[in-house]
Image: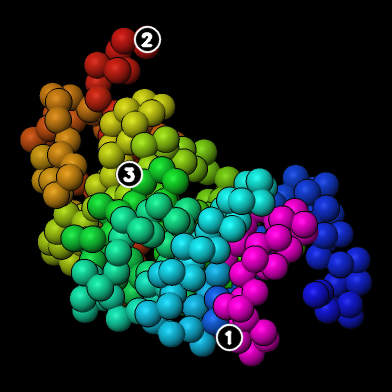
Amino acid sequence: MADPSRFPSGMKGLGQYLHSKNLLFGVTIGYGTLTCSGYPGSMNFLELDAKTMADWEVDYVKMNSCNSPDQMMPDGFEKFSRLLNGTGRPMAFLCTYPLYNSWYANPQSVDWKRLQNNCNLVRALPNIYSSWGSVFNIIDEYKLRNDILPKVAGPGHYNDPDMLVLGNNGLSNDQKRAHMGMWCMFAAPLLISADMDKVDEFSASLLRNKHLLAIDQDKGGHQAEFVKTRNDVQLWIRKLDNCPIGWAIACINTKVDGRPIDFSTNLDEFKSQMYTISGDKFELLDVFTGDRFKDVRLTENFTISINPSGIMMFRIIPFHLITSVQ
């Protein structure tokens, strides 16, 4: 039941208002006996709560796992997923129980296939806050669990590194670029955690960037893989399946102070467990500016300048695809 003082029109009325603005309606609930905020949880009311989500015309359901016994969560989330599907209303379902499980030290404790089958989105890592330390910690956690997370992501079951904190105080412009860029490399849901009336123009330009959004929304749904760290720079690669096929690469300066790094590399260096760039000649498109940065061969070195806690990110387009269109 909605709090009448906070939602005088009711939750369904709120959802209809959001839909009239071409927005989607998301709700957070809790699987446990109590939610994380201490309100009644869904554990003993799964059927009722699934029906309520549909009656309210909700589009996106995030289910937290506070106050839930570890051994009950996989079955409970699976049951709720089936109940949501049974309502006949399409709803994206975000599962968070890996976040509350000790999976990080023991990845085999989670049935990842079961998560793929039951959850559209999975939160496996800590909550984000509006600081570079928090943003980079999540990027680094993805690096450390590079053996698991990219393999279990794909269309219909994406990993969720948590919301975008663009538009809040706490990040420099370079850090905002790195935040948005890496979330797109991760094929993440781009949920904005900010007062939209107060979002600064630089953050807004990133949120509207068609090159970044095309990478994030690429139909292949491949999550970026960590390649290596060299000279304080993390190298990442993501395979792309459309508009056109190719790859995206990112280089993050992990230092938070000092001068920009002049970093020399070549495309042949970007080899990960699942992705390798193949071909002879390529165009490098700077996804932040939309400019053609350079044409290079696979083993030809090029140099980029990366600010502290900054990123350089390119779409790698095989040259034969460019010339065939011209």
Residue 302 in picture, x, y percent from top left: 17, 41
**What's under tag 1, amino acid-wise?**
Thr
2 vs 3, front mark: 3
Judging by the rendered image, the residue that carries numbered circle 2 is 326
Q: Which mark is residue 33?
A: 1
Residue lying at 41% horizontally and 43% vertically, measured from the top left? 155
**In which image quadrant can residue 177 be found?**
bottom left
**Within-10-Å neighbours for mark 2: few <14, some 14–19, many 20+:** few
- Mark 2–mark 1 contact, CB under 8 Å? no
Q: Quadrant of the C terminus?
A: top left
Outermost residue, bottom side: 38
**Inter-mark Cα distance, 2 to 3:** 28 Å
Judging by the rendered image, the residue that carries numbered circle 3 is 222
**Inter-mark Cα distance, 1 to 3:** 36 Å
In front here: 72 or 25? 72
Going from the N terminus, do you reach mark 1 or mark 3 first?
1
Magenta residues? 34-62
